[in-house]
Each structure stands twice: as C-alpha cells, then as structure tokens.
Amino acid sequence: MAAVWLMANRYGPGHTRFDNDWDREIGSALALNDTAVLLYDALGTERLGRITGAVRHYTPDPNLWRADLQTATGANRVWISTVVAVNAVLRDNGDDLARVRDALPASRGSGANGVLNGHEGGAEYDLPRKIGALRGVFGR
C-alpha cells in the first residue's frame, strides 16, 4: 500500500520536514484521511493508527498551521479544520471534533475575529459552503 510506504519513508514523526508546509499539513493529510475513510474496514487497527498518527503529527490543531504555528486563516483554516475533523472521526476523538467546532465562526462569512480573511475572492475556495458543510457535522 502506497500510504504505508509514504509513512515509512517520507511522512510522519521521525521524518525531516521538506518542501511546502501545505503539502504536509493539508494536501497529504487530506489525501491520507480520504484513503483511511475509503479503506477503513481493510486497514486494521495498526495501519489505521499509523495513518491517523502521521496526519495528526503534522495537523493536530484546527487553529494553527506550519511548523512555526501561525494562526490558520481563510481557506487554510477550512482545510485544516477538515483534516482535523476527519482524523478525529477516524480516531473516535470527540475532544478534537469539539476543537474543530470551536475553531470555525458561528456564522457564514469572514467572522468577527478575521479568521476567514484572505483567500476569499476566488470561487475555487467557496468558503461559506465549506464552512456550512463542516458546521453541519455539529448541527450548528
């Protein structure tokens, strides 16, 4: 399985950070979460734990991103929240799901705290729809 090779050779605890933070913390994390969801029944506890642990290593907090722990904003905030939410469901971790709920503004739009400022102009981000979908998980 490609995910097992990736974690053994390039991605997760014990591997040197390289290239772009987006690739590790968002792009690869989204793809590995998707893989784990699709193959959930076939992975087994050990492989599922390795995948979710590797993703959580790079993306543990829906509020922050990058090795220097910048506040995540705009589309990055939505993507990181998606990574943390799916990973929390895979790990059956309600505390992490609550952190995602609390990281997203209660209403659609940029939010009073400016959390969704930036990346808002492009249709490819469609932040209100994505926020609504994530918030729908929490019934708010």
Image (cartoon, rainbow, N blue to C red):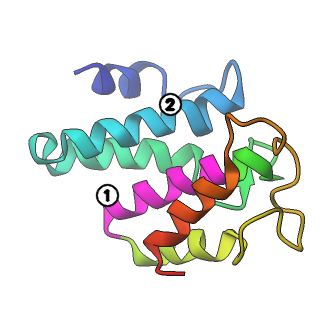
Q: Is residue 41 left or right of residue 11?
A: left
Where in the figure is residue 64, as x and y percent of width and height? 73, 55
Q: Amino acid at mark 1?
A: Leu
Say which of 131 and 51 sits in front: 131
Q: Main secondary structure of the magenta part?
A: helix
Q: Secondary structure at mark 2?
A: helix
Task: State how many labels appear.
Answer: 2
Identify the residue at horizontal 61%, vertical 47% (top origin). 79
Residue linked to disc 1: 90
Tell me which numbered mark, 2 or 1, is placed earlier along the sequence: 2
Q: Is residue 83 located in the magenta-colored stretch of the structure?
A: yes
Identify the residue at horizontal 89%, vertical 71% (top origin). 113
Looking at the rendering, the stretch of residues picked out in magenta corresponds to 78-92
Identify the residue at horizontal 47%, vertical 60% (top origin). 85
Where in the figure is residue 66, as x and y percent of width and height? 74, 42
Could you say which disc has been placed on residue 28 in the image?
2
Identify the residue at horizontal 23%, vertical 40% (top origin). 38
Q: Is residue 59 located in the magenta-colored stretch of the structure?
A: no
Say which of 64 and 85 sits in front: 85
Say which of 82 and 11 sits in front: 82
Q: Is residue 131 above or below residue 67?
A: below
Q: Is residue 12 visible?
A: no
